[in-house]
Image (cartoon, rainbow, N blue to C red):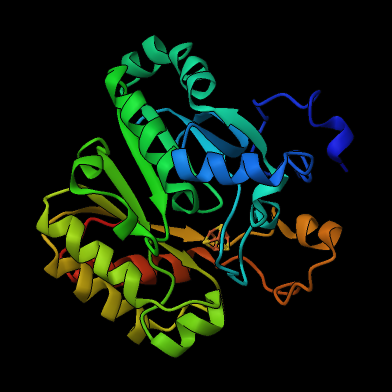
Amino acid sequence: MSDSRTAHTTPLEAKSPFELRVNLGADVPETTVRSALATGDMGFLHSFTTGATVDGPGVRVVAWTAGCMWRCLYCHNPDTWTMTNGMLVPVALALEELRKYKHGLQVMAGGFTLSGGEPLMQHRFAAKVLSGAKALGIHTALDTNGYFGDKLSDGELESIDLVLLDIKSWDPSRHRRLTGMDIEPTLTFARRLAARHRPMWLRYVLVPGLTDRFDDIAKIAQFAAKLSNVERVDVLPFHQMGKFKWNQLGIPYTLEHTDPPGQDLVERALDVFRRAGLKAV
Ligand code: SF4
């Protein structure tokens, strides 16, 4: 396990977001943290990864932010809940890293995705990195639970080519049990994105016994179908790749014995979205 003593030797680039990273920013003074959050000139990142093909169109470079106020029972990166588990990275350095891949990303019709954690926990940093990437001529995507969507101005939304919006459940009480938070701000953000004609992909994590109620999925599908901006729906099968993180961090994990969904269940969920007129993959 990493600790603060390794912060300066840990490379920003990781092989995958499933690398466990903790305490990389634990030594950052409180005043620096406050200033980073207020100005967005620096942000806490878990890592950069390259070659992703599931976080937006084409091949993507993904920056994984640290910090999330939700507590999803199926979260596969609980080390990103704590902001100071990440390393403090200046915007300029993040953009320098991105510049290295600019040509390749353009050739492969890919781009840059800011994910997490929840990127909008650091909304000033998120806005600066995304507008900087856009200014480099790179396609930009934001993967978010949408809770802090109102922190972004209309102008800032324009620098985001695509929002990957995670909707976890439709029923408010089930949503609260699943994530610890209310669903409404996410839906409000989705409506705002639609009103502003900002392209959106909806993401839905399918967990047997937890998010596989078809009446719930149908309501999300009906909601999404009424929005004018949902280009596609990704049904993401639950997996256990993050289980070791829960165990290593000593956080009680309730899905220890939950299996990934079978193909049949995935197809049925996809079908619910498709029957509402949406493209679902
Ligand atoms: S919103 Fe994402 S990062 Fe946050 S707890 Fe849920 S799955 Fe994990």
Q: Quadrant of residue 207?
A: bottom right
Which residue is found at the position 72% from the left and 46% from the top? 85
Q: What percent of the width, then of the height, locates residue 61?
A: 48, 28
Q: Quadrant of residue 203?
A: bottom left
* Drawn side of residue 277 relative to residue 131, left or right: left
Q: Is residue 214 above or below residue 24?
A: below
Q: Front-most of 273 and 231?
A: 231
Q: What percent of the width, then of the height, locates residue 88?
A: 64, 34
Q: Is residue 183 above or below residue 24?
A: below
Q: Front-most of 153 and 39?
A: 39
Judged from this view, the residue extending furthest toward the front is 31
Which residue is found at the position 79% from the left and 25% from the top? 8
Q: What percent of the width, then of the height, locates residue 108?
A: 35, 19
Q: What percent of the width, then of the height, locates residue 266?
A: 44, 65
* Visible residue check, residue 57: no
Q: Is residue 215 above or below residue 274?
A: below
* Visible residue check, residue 252: yes
Which residue is found at the position 55% from the left and 37% from the top? 43
Q: Front-most of 110 and 173?
A: 173
Q: How many marks?
A: 0
> Split into 4 quadrants, where in the image is the N terminus?
top right
Q: Quadrant of residue 262?
A: bottom right
Which residue is found at the position 23% from the left and 55% from the top? 279
Task: Tell which quarter ligand 1 is in.
Answer: bottom right
Q: Front-most of 121 and 105?
A: 121
